[in-house]
């Protein structure tokens, strides 16, 4: 290790969550912090995902920070390159680069009970921090299934989030594995180049047209000259999506009309009844993420594309074999199989107060108070934590809500004074999680009849928030100290002096009943209009 540094706050990751945390810390007057980034540039998932056709399925003016509006978005749904450029702009505008430590892969974080601080081991040095804000995000570590024979495949193999830009797909026979949000963008982009494209579809997605268009110069001029017009546009986009929430969370049967619209859009491009049948989902729309594309179905109808309605079972040399026995010779295999979302690899690198890793603590399912703090891990917070994901709107809204919570967390530590930590009560976490899961039972994500990446190995949805972004904003407005214990540093005697040793103490600052009634009431209040 070639360096050691102590900071007030260590932020892990420089995507939307990490950069947002850095901006908010500076606004709170906290400049003693670092952003530890494993790559050599900012951007998070928008740096890593550079595959052909990569774009956002949330409107541009809503997929940006409220404190850093961009009047110059070129399209209503911006591409990866524009979103990454926006994040670079944020890093420069808010003077964050002096805080960022690039190529610092976090190998382990351990809580020191005596010093009340985190010891952080990275690939380029060690750090200690009073507080850790983990903003690695759920879409950071690609998942490639264990396929028999894959290691012996003689061609090229890569994941959508690790695109091989040096490999030319022109004239190649390509197998695309998966039909998620990345795959439906990749297929139309590579279809014209490939000699043959075979799509392995375990489950067909619901796909709606993406109403994308170029934003005119006049619109951009207006947003630059009159910023309130950009804010109004953002507000309208937000409001329309908030109105959709009840159908997903309370009345899934109302989604039948949307299914009819999706089927009509499919029928315009897919004339073959047999192919249309293979592409029609058997579950309620919304159970898996609704995908947006106006090019996906036309690409599947092209003569050089085959849709295999089955997952990939094994690889025999250069032959890929589906679960239904379909065998196809290919030159390249591209996995669009998603990420480690409910089994976050970073959780294996976080060791808490009792020596238990976060992964061990979450072995029965992820859970965190207000999606932010985990029992047994003092002064540790996560951005885009358990049950903070969305199926209808912009994650930036949820990130900003958690930044509000982080800011108040830091204020509470300052008011308490000295070497101090906040340790969330297990009863508060349990009550919050219980209430969230109760609300989840009524949602389309639990009752829609699908098996999605939202669900963990136990079949629980530990990914999504079962309410509106407004409800979550209210729930994370401030830290309720009744949900925490205050832990103060042990006072040690100086050699030769007679000073009593005061053990590290947990000072209760508010009563929480054994079943966490206060926390339950808080989440009930956050979603009172169920």
Image (cartoon, rainbow, N blue to C red):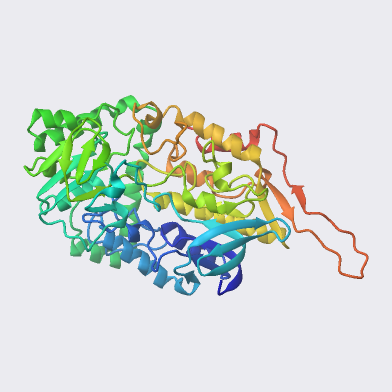
Q: Between residue 255 and residue 274, name the one nearer to us.
A: 274
- The mark tally for this picture is 0
Residue 523 is left or right of residue 215, and the answer is right
Q: Between residue 156 and residue 488, name the one nearer to us.
A: 156
Rendering coords of residue 308 (x, y %):
18, 35
Q: Is residue 450 above or below residue 358?
A: above
Residue located 61% across and 49% down the image: 479
- The answer to whether residue 30 is visible is no
On the image, which quarter does residue 497 sit in?
bottom right
Residue 371 is left or right of residue 58, and the answer is right
Quarter of the figure that contains the N terminus? bottom right
Q: Is residue 459 above or below residue 238?
A: above
Rendering coords of residue 435 (x, y %):
54, 32
Rendering coords of residue 280 (x, y %):
20, 30
Residue 326 is left or right of residue 118, and the answer is left
- The answer to whether residue 214 is visible is yes
Rendering coords of residue 496 (x, y %):
92, 70
Residue located 8% across and 31% down the image: 272
């Amino acid at each position: 290790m070639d360096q050691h540094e102590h900071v007030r706050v260590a932020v892990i990751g420089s995507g939307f969550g990490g950069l947002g945390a850095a901006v908010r810390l500076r606004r709170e007057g906290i400049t003693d912090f670092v952003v530890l980034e494993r790559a050599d540039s900012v951007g998070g998932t928008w740096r890593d995902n550079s595959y052909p056709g990569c774009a956002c399925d949330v409107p541009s003016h809503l997929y940006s920070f409220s404190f850093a509006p961009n009047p110059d978005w070129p399209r209503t749904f911006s591409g990866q390159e524009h979103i990454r450029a926006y994040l670079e702009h944020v890093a420069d505008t808010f003077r964050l680069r002096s805080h960022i430590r690039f190529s610092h892969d976090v190998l382990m974080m351990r809580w020191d009970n005596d010093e009340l601080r985190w010891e952080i081991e990275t690939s380029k040095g060690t750090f200690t921090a009073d507080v850790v804000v983990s903003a690695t995000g759920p879409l950071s570590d690609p998942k490639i299934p264990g396929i028999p024979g894959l290691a012996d495949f003689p061609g090229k193999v890569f994941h959508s989030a690790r695109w091989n830009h040096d490999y030319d797909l022109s004239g190649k026979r390509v197998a695309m594995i998966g039909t998620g949000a990345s795959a439906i963008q990749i297929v139309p982009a590579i279809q014209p180049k490939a000699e043959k494209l075979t799509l392995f579809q375990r489950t067909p997605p619901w796909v709606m047209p993406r109403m994308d268009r170029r934003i005119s110069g006049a619109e951009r001029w207006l947003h630059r000259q009159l910023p309130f017009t950009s804010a109004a546009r953002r507000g309208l986009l937000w409001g329309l999506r908030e109105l959709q929430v009840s159908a997903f969370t309370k009345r899934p049967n109302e989604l039948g009309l949307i299914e009819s619209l999706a089927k009509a859009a499919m029928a315009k491009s897919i004339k073959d009844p047999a192919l249309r049948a293979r592409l029609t989902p058997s579950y309620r729309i919304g159970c898996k993420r609704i995908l947006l594309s106006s090019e996906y179905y036309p690409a599947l109808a092209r003569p050089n594309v085959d849709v295999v309605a089955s997952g990939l079972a094994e690889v025999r040399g250069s032959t890929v074999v589906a679960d239904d026995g379909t065998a196809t010779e290919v030159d390249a295999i591209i996995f669009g199989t998603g990420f480690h979302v409910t089994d976050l690899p970073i959780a294996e690198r976080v060791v808490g107060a009792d020596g238990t890793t976060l992964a061990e603590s979450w072995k029965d399912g992820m859970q965190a108070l207000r999606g932010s703090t985990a029992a047994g891990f003092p002064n540790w917070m996560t951005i885009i934590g358990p049950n903070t994901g969305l199926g209808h709107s912009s994650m930036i809204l949820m990130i900003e809500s958690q930044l509000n919570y982080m800011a108040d967390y830091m204020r509470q530590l300052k008011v308490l004074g000295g070497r101090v930590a906040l340790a969330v009560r297990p009863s508060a976490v349990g009550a919050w999680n219980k209430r969230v899961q109760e609300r989840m039972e009524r949602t389309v994500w639990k009752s829609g009849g699908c098996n999605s990446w939202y669900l963990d190995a136990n079949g629980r949805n530990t990914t999504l928030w079962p309410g509106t972004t407004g409800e979550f904003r209210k729930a994370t407005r401030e830290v309720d100290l009744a949900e925490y214990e205050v832990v103060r540093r042990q006072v040690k005697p100086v050699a030769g002096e007679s000073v009593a040793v005061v053990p590290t103490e947990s000072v209760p600052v508010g009563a929480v009943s054994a079943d966490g009634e206060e926390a339950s009431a808080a989440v009930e209040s956050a979603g009172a209009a169920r």
